[in-house]
Image (cartoon, helix red, strand yellow):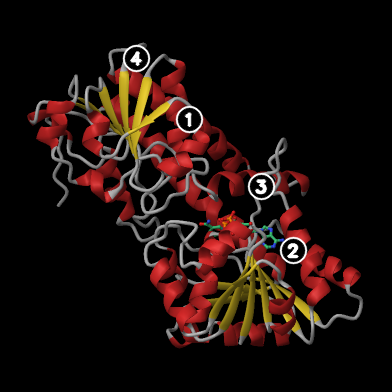
Amino acid sequence: MRVAMIGSGYVGLVSGACFADFGHVVTCVDKDPAKIDALRRGEMPIYEPGLSDLVATNVRQGRLAFATDLTQAVREADAVFISVGTPSRRGDGYADLSYVYQAAREIAGALSGYTVVVTKSTVPVGTGDEVERIIAETRPGADFAVVSNPEFLREGAAISDFKRPDRIVIGADDANAEAVMAELYRPLYLNQAPIVVTSRRTAELTKYAANAFLATKITFINEIADLCERVGANVQEIARGIGLDNRIGSKFLHAGPGYGGSCFPKDTVALIKTAQDYQAPIRLVEAVVAVNDQRKRAMGRKVIAACGGTVRGKRIAVLGLTFKPNTDDMREAPSLAIIAALQDAGARVRAYDPEGMDQARILLDDVEYAQDPYACAEGADALAIVTEWDAFRALDLERVRTVLKSPVIVDLRNIYRPDDMERRGFTYVSVGRPNGAAHETIF
Ligand SMILES: NC(=O)c1ccc[n+]([C@@H]2O[C@H](COP(=O)([O-])OP(=O)(O)OC[C@H]3O[C@@H](n4cnc5c(N)ncnc54)[C@H](O)[C@@H]3O)[C@@H](O)[C@H]2O)c1
């Protein structure tokens, strides 16, 4: 099949490359000429493990191409995917659909023959209706159907998530469109990936429900972690104790500095807005958003407390800036609020991240960047681990202790063991776990 992918960011580029790898002929289109030039030179505009090789292979085999103009790709396409951004609208938190609607207008102008237009972007319920209206109005008589196919891939594991998804959700109100979608995803049908076919509106809302539920799970365990700290219990053991219950499940029960990233923060807020508009407020998610917002800065206060209550004039080393490992995405990363809290309290911050420093430079002022974790820790009054990159799980702790001015580590991802860290001479603070002689064994 011929596919046009409109928007070549995390989702568009990964989806486009994976569809090409399934054997389809794909053109990834993006308005940003710098992005398309880079892709044509074989340079990836984002950091995503395995993406560079996947793109190179499919370009070489003639199944993947890049363009700044969508006309030809859309004219030839059986399916046109809209995978442009849907950020929070400035001021009110609704999803900003201007990129989606603009893409719909541009697609309408180029349609030729029966074409399925697929919204892969995360869009509020009812957006498909509006996309359909815009296309019909711009190109009366055009032969098309609009389908919702929300994307569930995770940055950092995007390719394997796309190729081995837990499920594929297809919202189609038209049998021909459903058949085109089945053909596109045929390799996954053959792998027996569960396909959930629903109405378009149901598919749109499924994506928000999924993200809101995951954000709720994270926030739940974070609040349990706070209680653990008050009562001397261990949140990791509780997570295991509840996660082994199949009704609960063990994933997304890692206490930490609060969720961030390009999806959960904006999608939870957008869902709240939609629900309020339809007079069905989801108060649980409203609470999740409020708790999570406060938590990020509270993690800055946790570092300050570990430094004896003040960081004025002190140097704090921050390891990890991206919202999670294996991405360079800094959108809504907890590190932003944590560093701001430390700077507000008078600290000087030096940071290191394996992939995120270029993006961080755009978003953060007055931060010094180090070339590796040890240079970051050099002479610091405390070290905060904010993102759990693998490289931070196996630090030479003896070297870290030697280069730090005072041996204080605040581990906001619980990647080290409190008893071990204390034995090594650190003042060690983590999330929701008692220090010292705590019962650490997990059988
Ligand atoms: N990033 C994720 O992990 C993830 C996961 C699932 C779903 N989503 C959803 O997918 C959508 C895209 O997210 P993303 O992270 O890939 O965004 P992104 O910002 O990385 O990429 C969007 C791209 O679309 C381009 N664009 C905008 N308007 C265009 C137009 N009219 N024509 C051509 N290109 C255009 C932009 O230049 C940009 O490169 C969002 O709705 C997001 O919520 C993201």
Q: Secondary structure at mark 2?
A: helix
Q: Are marks 2 and 4 in contact (CB under 8 Å)?
A: no
| Residue 409 in sight in this render | yes
Label 2 CB, ligand 1: below 8 Å? yes
Q: Counting residues from the N terminus, which is met first, the one under dot 1 or under dot 3?
A: 3
Q: Secondary structure at mark 1?
A: helix
Disc 2 residue type (three-letter): Ala
Q: Counting residues from the N terminus, which is met first, the one under dot 1 or under dot 4?
A: 4
Quarter holding residue 413: top left
Label 3, label 2: how far apart the Cα atoms are: 20 Å
- The residue that label 3 is drawn on is 270
Q: Are marks 3 and 4 in contact (CB under 8 Å)?
A: no
Disc 4 residue type (three-letter): Val
Q: Secondary structure at mark 3?
A: helix
Q: Counting residues from the N terminus, which is met first, the one under dot 2 or under dot 4?
A: 2
Disc 1 residue type (three-letter): Ala
- Category of crowding for the residue at label 2, using alpha-carbon neighbours closer than 10 angstroms: few (below 14), some (14–19), many (at least 20): many
Label 1 CB, ligand 1: below 8 Å? no
- The residue that label 2 is drawn on is 103
Disc 3 residue type (three-letter): Ala
- The residue that label 4 is drawn on is 311
Label 1, label 3: how far apart the Cα atoms are: 21 Å
In percent of the image, x 48 and y 63: which residue is there?
Answer: 153
Query: Does residue 159 lie above or below 219 as drawn?
Result: below
Quarter of image, ligand 1: bottom right
Label 3, label 4: how far apart the Cα atoms are: 36 Å
x, y percent for residue 141: 90, 81
- The residue that label 1 is drawn on is 337
In percent of the image, x 42 and y 35: which residue is there?
Answer: 335
Q: Counting residues from the N terminus, which is met first, the one under dot 3 or under dot 2?
A: 2
